[in-house]
């Protein structure tokens, strides 16, 4: 096996590893959305029918589950190329302009991924407080999904920039 074969084999391993991380993050995003639906429904039922509620339910829903779901879903959207695209260049443009703009898009997405990874990580380590209604839960837990999403966005963008094939059917 030559040098190129080793590189292709290693790229395949990296792609399978990233696909597993994406699949796990998709399961977490669905779970977080489900928990949020349950928590909000229970809190609404308790408020309107029993004139009471649990104070930490709303805070957990909006401060922990919503950011986690949002950022993990954003990473999946970037992988599946579901984000908003603007096509300003008409179809009659030369192929090289379309290719260059596509590469520029992936480069910008990679930079955004690295920014999310860097600043999300620094945000987690800089917050030392706890969530007010649940002192056992650190406030940094609401930001855990940001560096994970940044890592996934950066990796997928770099893979797309290098021309690696995407296999997204497992996320459907």
Image (tube, rainbow, N blue to C red):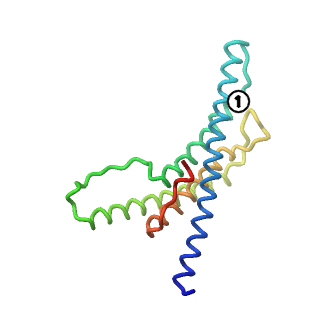
Residue drawn 44% across and 68% down?
A: 163
Residue drawn 47% across and 65% down?
A: 165
Residue 106: image location, x then y, percent:
42, 61
Residue drawn 59% across and 75% down?
A: 10
Between 26 and 61, the one lying in front of the other is: 26
The image quarter containing residue 35 is: top right
Which residue is most to the right? 136
User: Could you tell me which quadrant the N terminus lies in?
Assistant: bottom right
Which residue is most to the left? 92
Residue count near mark 1 (Cα–Cα under 10 Å), binned few <14, some 14–19, many ≥20? some
Between 116 and 76, the one lying in front of the other is: 76
User: Is residue 118 placed above or below 131 in the rendered structure?
Assistant: below
Residue 58: image location, x then y, percent:
66, 29
Tally of numbered discs: 1
State the SS at label 1: helix
Residue 67: image location, x then y, percent:
59, 42
In this picture, residue 8 sits left or right of residue 93: right
In this picture, residue 132 sits left or right of residue 80: right
Residue 37: image location, x then y, percent:
63, 30
The image quarter containing residue 56 is: top right
In this picture, residue 141 sits left or right of residue 78: right
Q: Name the residue beneath numbered marker 1.
A: 57
Residue drawn 67% across and 13% down?
A: 48
User: Is residue 85 placed above or below 118 in the rendered structure?
Assistant: above
């Amino acid at each position: 096996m030559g040098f190129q074969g080793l590189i292709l084999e290693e790229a395949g391993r990296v792609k399978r590893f990233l696909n597993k991380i994406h699949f796990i993050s998709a399961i977490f995003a669905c779970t977080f959305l489900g928990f949020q639906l349950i928590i909000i429904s229970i809190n609404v039922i308790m408020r309107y029918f029993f004139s009471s509620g649990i104070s930490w339910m709303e805070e957990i829903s909006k401060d922990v589950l919503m950011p986690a779901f949002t950022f993990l879903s954003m990473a999946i959207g970037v992988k599946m190329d579901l984000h908003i695209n603007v096509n300003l260049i008409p179809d009659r443009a030369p192929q090289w302009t379309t290719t260059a703009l596509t590469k520029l898009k992936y480069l910008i997405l990679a930079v955004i991924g690295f920014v999310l990874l860097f600043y999300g990580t620094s945000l987690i380590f800089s917050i030392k407080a706890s969530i007010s209604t649940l002192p056992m839960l650190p406030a940094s837990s609401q930001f855990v999904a940001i560096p994970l999403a940044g890592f996934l966005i950066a990796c997928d963008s770099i893979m797309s920039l290098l021309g690696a094939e995407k296999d997204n059917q497992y996320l459907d």
